[in-house]
Image (cartoon, rainbow, N blue to C red):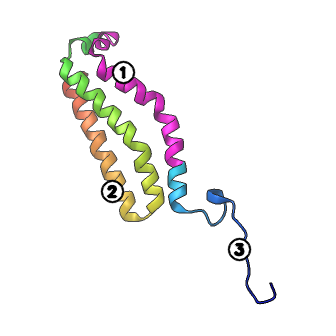
């Protein structure tokens, strides 16, 4: 021990000062997934059961079945991709990465708005 070799002490993992960005991204992705798990389930349920269209009543009841299903599948895909996008953005944490994630979210948001206006609402 007197030879000058220092043994490194184990650190506290992702919550310590030396946490890996990839671990932070995975942790935040898992937290986001916990928040969107129920909405993902509901969106997939609406997409796979077109008869649920009648639950909404009004103008939605008269919308096309194909548009209704496509709208809910798009919502389900966006919600499923969200934890991965957030985790990846946190792991990289650069201006370029944040711009890419923002662009992907904007494209999905615009697609949902357009599909909602054309087919659902």
Where's residue 115, x and y in %? 22, 31
Residue 16 versus residue 83 in the image, above or below: below
Q: Which residue is mark 3?
A: 8
Residue 66 versus residue 35 in the image, above or below: above
- At mark 3, the secondary structure is loop
Where's residue 19, x and y in %? 60, 62
Question: In the depicted view, which residue is nearer to us: 117 or 72?
Answer: 72
- At mark 1, the secondary structure is helix
- Residue located 44% across and 62% down the image: 92
Residue 64 versus residue 10 in the image, above or below: above
Q: Earlier in the sequence, mark 3 or mark 1?
A: 3
- Mark 3 or 1, closer to the camera: 3
The image quadrant where one finds the C terminus is top left
- At mark 2, the secondary structure is helix
Q: Which residue is mark 1?
A: 45
Point out the stretch of residues depicted in magenta: 28-57
- Residue located 53% across and 48% down the image: 28
Q: Main secondary structure of the magenta part?
A: helix
Few, some or many residues within 10 Å of mark 3 (<14, 14–19, 20+) = few
Question: Is residue 52 within the magenta segment?
Answer: yes
């Amino acid at each position: 021990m007197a030879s000058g070799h220092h043994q490194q002490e184990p650190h506290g993992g992702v919550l310590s000062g030396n946490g890996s960005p990839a671990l932070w991204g995975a942790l935040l992705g898992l937290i986001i997934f916990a928040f969107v798990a129920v909405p993902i389930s509901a969106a997939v349920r609406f997409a796979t059961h077109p008869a649920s269209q009648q639950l909404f009543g009004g103008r939605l009841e008269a919308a096309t079945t194909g548009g209704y299903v496509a709208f809910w599948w798009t919502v389900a895909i966006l919600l499923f991709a969200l934890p991965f996008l957030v985790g990846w953005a946190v792991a990289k944490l650069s201006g370029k990465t944040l711009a890419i994630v923002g662009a992907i979210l904007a494209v999905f948001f615009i697609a949902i708005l357009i599909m909602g206006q054309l087919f659902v609402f």
